[in-house]
Amino acid sequence: MARYLLKRIFYMILTLLIVATVTFFLMKLMPGSPYANEAKMTLTQRQIMDQQYGLNKPIWQQYLIYIAGMLHGDFGTSFQYSNQPVASLIGARLGASVQLGLQALILGVVLGVIAGAIAAMRQGTWVDSTATVISILGKSVPNFVLAVLLQYYIGLKLGWFPIAGWGQFSQTIMPTIALAVGPFAETARFIRTSMVDTLSSDYIELGKAKGLSRMEVIRKHAMRNSMIPLVTLIGPYAVALMTGSMVIENIFNVPGIGEQFVKSILTNDYPTIMGITMVYCIGLVVILLITDIVYGLIDPRIRLDESEA
Amino acid sequence: MKFTKLFAAGATVLIAGSTLAACGSNSNSSSGSSAKKTINWMDAAEIPTMDISKAIDATSFNQLGNVEEGLYRLGKNSKVENALATDTKVSKDGKTWTFTLRDSKWSNGDKLTAKDFVYSWRRTVNPKTASQYAYLFEGIHNATQISAGKAPVNSLGVKAEGDNKLVVTLDKRIPYFKLLMGFPLFFPQNQKVVEANGSKYGTSSKTTAFNGPFVQKGWTGSNLSWKLVKNKNYWDKKNVKLDAINYSVQKTPSTAYNLYQSNKLDATVLDSQQTKNLKHQKGYTLRDTAATFYLQFNQKKKIFQNANLRRAISMSINRKALGSALGGANTPATSLTSKGVVNHDGKDWSEVVGDKKNATYNPTEAKKLYKKALKELGVKNVSFTILSDDTDSGQKTTETLQSQLEENLKGMKVSVANVPFKTRLNRSTSGNFDVVVTGWSADFADPISFVDLFTSKNAQNNGKWSNAQYDKLIADSKTTADTTKRWNDLEKAEKILLSDEGIAPLYYKTEAWLVRPDIKGIVYNGAGLNYNFKNAYVAN
């Protein structure tokens, strides 16, 4: 296990380095400068600015300087927010996105599992069709449409929850619901299919033959085996949700990271683009590692390291 | 059965949790505009900085204009009013300005002196500060050389004589100098606070010093809500009526409008659809943004050296239809200087110089001119590409122009290219275009902030249109001591540009807002800083 982990961590670092390198050079291919007032600056002024920010150096030098800084934990300072270190900018923004993402993931997956399981158990009945229709709707209706509808009807007309804002738990409910629809629909469809499969396997028949009650068969055998593939699904979903959604954040005035990322690309805010990309990437590789470990733990058939088998 | 019960219990907990949360929210949301001395305002973007030397955007300027103050404050129609200056003396040659300052304090109690101006200005032009707006100092003695690192910072033409006298030396006359003094870039900075905070200065409310009618609280650097609170140390606090302005960032107009309807906001900017729907609602307010959109023709391409072709294109554009296609409240443009920027002798400057002939839809005349142009050029037809941003309005603009031109000028082949803003800018500057849709907004309320662009050597003159008489008029307007002559020069120059169709004006960008009608006394100016809340109040 230790050897496996070491190997994985080595590959993780390698992945991060490759991502950093590719992003850096791709980013430098984008036209224009990171100066917001670029349209009004003359060439001489731009040259003066480039000198101040070290952007007049050859790109490979800028790359080495950046990587060296990054290894020392220095992600540079933002161009959009003058003098703000990228690390603290991400720090201030990531919290809200992670909280919303986690809430949405838990809500979506829990409800999805319930809906999927019920649909599978009542396969072919109206319950199944209703659950299927809801999950197809959930998959096909964009979350921002739902967000706008929730905001108008639940927030403005009924006044149940605050229309927008951040700071109180109540303000997180509508964005959570809007974001949860995706994982809900995905989980429900996934669980239904996988459970219908499991329910028709031999060991379920055996369980029933042994005289176990229906609920016991489902809880002890069907559920557990149907849930295993879900782990694969949840990992990347968790990263996608926790790194923020620009549209949902904008609709509900959530100070999240999603919009910052898009804005940093549009404004050529190089240090911020790099910083957020690295955070995304670290999140993804760590979650993938955790997924693989969890896999091995819940399913003894999946072995992490062949040499230890 | 146990299984379903378990899930049923889970669902109940979830629903109960959200209901409880809902109750919590109801008890907390009692703000609104019921408090008569507090208003809830919005901005469309986060504050990038509160550092005067670094600010470049409307959001920062709106903040700085209300929490900081310079020699002058701009009133209605950008009228210059004394703020920290009580008296201004100008030498005969217009190159030495002596300002007498009133006694005033910073919000932390420090005395504000002429030295704070000297420090601030030197800091901005210092190349180490990397101010993107340093070029506005051009004309102040040595400013350009200092920015380029070719002269020491302390050689800038500004000095303090005692605490209350500020003397500014110019290399040349700057006719709009007073307007500049009302722009945040020229406000004072508290050296003690700037140096104590180092690179953190202006990155949060706590690391910024204030001297304006309000002080800012609760801005942490990138958050979406903060407050402006009445400044107890402000010299004219008796005329500041509001206790507080609650600010929030609203990026989605539908959200802002929902908040407005539920009294959580007192003003909201409208998107094009809302503008259409809410035109007749009480509080509907139009705001000129001091920005004009126009076409630049690349004169390096032979066909665009032909003025008749340029005129034919301009006359084939139905600007009203373009406005409808864009939605919103934009106004058809007939001039380069935007509407609502300069009010001269009681008349809007865009009306004084506007070219009704070339910039009015006239397909019959356009056809004639097009025929003439083809003959002059010795070609059977022309084809070119219109370049613009890939934004929604950029795409609508190019699509509309393409169909209007091809319909009115038979045989003309128009292609469109919509690219990201930075790419468009890059292609404009390097002259890599045929016709480009450009937008320009004024930094200060004087026609020169527009007409200067099209002098032959100006870096922003992307199409390289050139006219010797125009260049001379603009140069003269900058040096003459005679105000009447200056305005005449500016008028003649812009008329030359428009009649020669150096550019084809498209529209003036106008924003529509809903503003609670009981809020009075706000001073709005399109150029420079937009909102001045010093004398704003809520009527009973």
Image (cartoon, coloured by chain):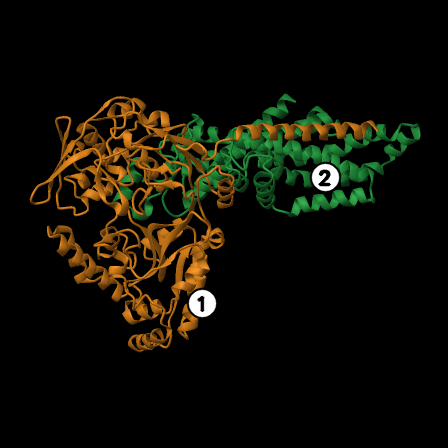
Chain colours: A green, B orange
Q: Amino acid at mark 2?
A: Ala
Q: Is residue B439 above or below residue B231?
A: below
Residue B531: image quadrant is: top left
Q: CA distance from mark 2 to mark 1?
A: 48 Å
Residue identified by numbered label 2: A188
Q: Is residue B76 above or below residue B25?
A: below
In the rendered view of the protein, which quadrant contains the C terminus of chain A? top right
Residue at x 39% of width, y 66% of height: B318
Residue B212 in the image: x percent, y percent? 29, 31
Q: Is residue B427 above or below residue B86?
A: below
Characterize the local packing of mark 2: few (<14), some (14-19) or many (20 or more) Cα atoms within 10 angstroms.
Answer: many
A63 or A83, which is in the foreground? A83
Q: Which mark is residue B403?
A: 1
Horizontal side of B239 relative to B138 (left or right) equals right
A125 or B419, which is in the foreground? A125
Residue at x 26% of width, y 21% of height: B109
Characterize the local packing of mark 1: few (<14), some (14-19) or many (20 or more) Cα atoms within 10 angstroms.
Answer: some
B344 or B309, which is in the foreground? B344
Secondary structure, mark 1, is helix
Q: Amino acid at mark 1?
A: Ser
Q: Residue furthest left?
A: B92
Q: Residue furthest front?
A: B540
